[in-house]
Image (spheres, helix red, strand yellow):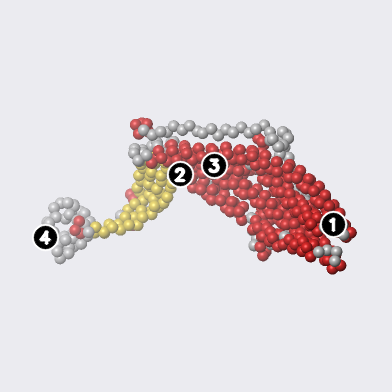
Amino acid sequence: MTAVLSSCNLDWEKPNISTPPPARFKEAAPKSADPIPSGRDFVAKFGSKELTGIVELALSDNLDIAAAAARILEADAQARTASAPLYPNISMQDIVRTNRTAGTTLNLGNAATGVNTGSYSTNSNLQSTSNRSPSGIPNGRNYGFFQLGAAAASYTVDFWGVNEDASFASRLLANASRFDRDVVEISTVTAVMNAYFQVLNAQDQLQIARTNVAIAEKVNAAIQGRYTVGTASMFDTAQQETVLAQQRATIPPLEMTLRQTTNTLAVLLGRTPEAFSLKGGSLTQLKFPKIDTGLPSEVLLRRPDIARVEAQLASQEFSVLNARAQFFPSITLVGLYGPQSALISNLINPQALAWNAATQLAQPVFDGWFLQGQYENQKGRYAELAALYRKQIISALTDTENALIAVKETEKQLKLQSVAVAAARRAFEAANMQLSEGTIDIITLSVTQNTLFTAQQQEANIRLSYYQAASTLYQALGGGWSPTTRNAELARANAAYEANKGPWP
């Protein structure tokens, strides 16, 4: 065994997975903070009962969350299956069997003379020579075998931790499946918020477009009046009609966006478009929530996606150990206990009781380097997950920094754009007054109108980005997940594992 194992490379230098977090975020104050509220409580801060209601529906009816919950059941069952070899395998073996031996295989002496050569004693139960076919060959014989309620047991002694490693690996994946469900839940809440904000933005844009159409129609009517009395040219009327048509053309795509986004929201709630309706409103009516970031080290502990990869990495370590233990010998204990008889009537006799016990030792000698390949494969998978784990940490910190930047900069942009809208509105009002006095040309008026219309649309889109930055920051900070949530998930996983054991230890 030593010679065989010495030809295999069983050394393993684990990749370094340490990634110390920075002391603070660049875009936030360096101070500790409590976890942000979870889904329902967080969305309530926007001040919309409708938004809170649809988030609650999503948490209960979203099909992605339901699928993630089903994957937990699958992982729990797999953990139970992988842990089964830790216990003895006991089964009942009842056998009813009849065999017929061909007469041509019975060695009864010279079939032609009928002389017994002594292969069987005269007290045997074999057919006599008188029970022969016309050719002198015996007709054969039937043999019966009966076994009732015999208990067969086997147990592999887990000297090297093969079965225990497989059990731990599978149980850690069951933990990862619970963290994955939390990731899906947070992503769903974020998607619902973003879709709802898009609906409100589409409604705001439609309101702006319809108001601008009404303004353009009013200006067009004034220019048409001037054209009638000869104070405006055909060019003036055509120019304003172009502005009016362009504003009307902005409405259909906004209607399409509104209805399609509403349908997307229905899917997130597990509804068909026909079974879902939305009142909506305006983004200007929502409140922007106050969000405390906390320290990077705190954020990393509040991210279920990091906990998921961490659990997968821990599981893979046991898979590597399991692959390594496959090189060593395995010892299996087997046994059988129960009545056996050639005649069913004798099964109840004490003499029918039979038992056997054995120990089996198996040692891989040469398998074409199959076990070595399996071992190297598992080590490679661990190295892959280690790199992904470090990447997930960096991504989490980057997500948070980017979300903080988006909140800060879109807030500034929204304030500046509001100033631009106010200035554009004053310019248009002045131009409209000059139009009534007949002291402005149509080109200047058209430019003033388009400047106002564009500024209003940009303001609405910036406001959408501002609120979506809040939902992105919610997701980046873990969506209310915390070490307390983690411990609760692990407790549920352990409870599920214990419950699945059944009556056996």
Q: Earlier in the sequence, mark 1 or mark 3?
A: 3
State the image coordinates of residue 246 (x, y, percent, origin top left). Answer: 73, 61
Could you tell me residue 17's position as x and y percent?
55, 34
Residue mark closest to the camera, 4 vs 3: 3
The image's mark for residue 334 is: none
- Which residue lies at the image location 41% right of the left edge and 44% below the top edge? 154
Q: Name the amino acid, label 3.
A: Gln
Q: Is residue 261 left or right of residue 221?
A: left
Kindly identify which residue carries mark 2: 85
Q: Which residue is mark 1?
A: 440
Query: CA–CA distance between discs 1 and 3?
Result: 71 Å
The mark nearer the N terminus, 4 or 1, is 4
**Farthest residue, direction left:** 113
Report the Cα–Cα distance between label 4 and label 3.
77 Å
Front of the two marks 3 and 2? 3
The kind of residue on which mark 1 rests is Ile
Image point (42%, 33%), residue name: 10
For the N terminus, the quadrant is top left
Q: Is residue 475 left or right of residue 122?
A: right
Would you name the residue on which mark 3 appears? 312
How many labels were placed on the picture? 4
Ranked by sequence position, the earlier of labels 4 and 3 is 4
Give the distance between the C-alpha atoms of the residues marked 2 and 1, in whole angstroms. 91 Å
38, 200: nearer the viewer: 200
Q: Nearer the viewer, residue 37 or 279?
A: 279
Residue 334 appears anywhere in the view = yes
Distance Cα–Cα, label 3 vs label 2: 22 Å
Q: Which mark is residue 112?
A: 4
Q: Residue at x 61, y 38 (%)?
A: 394
Nearer the observer, 192 or 91: 192
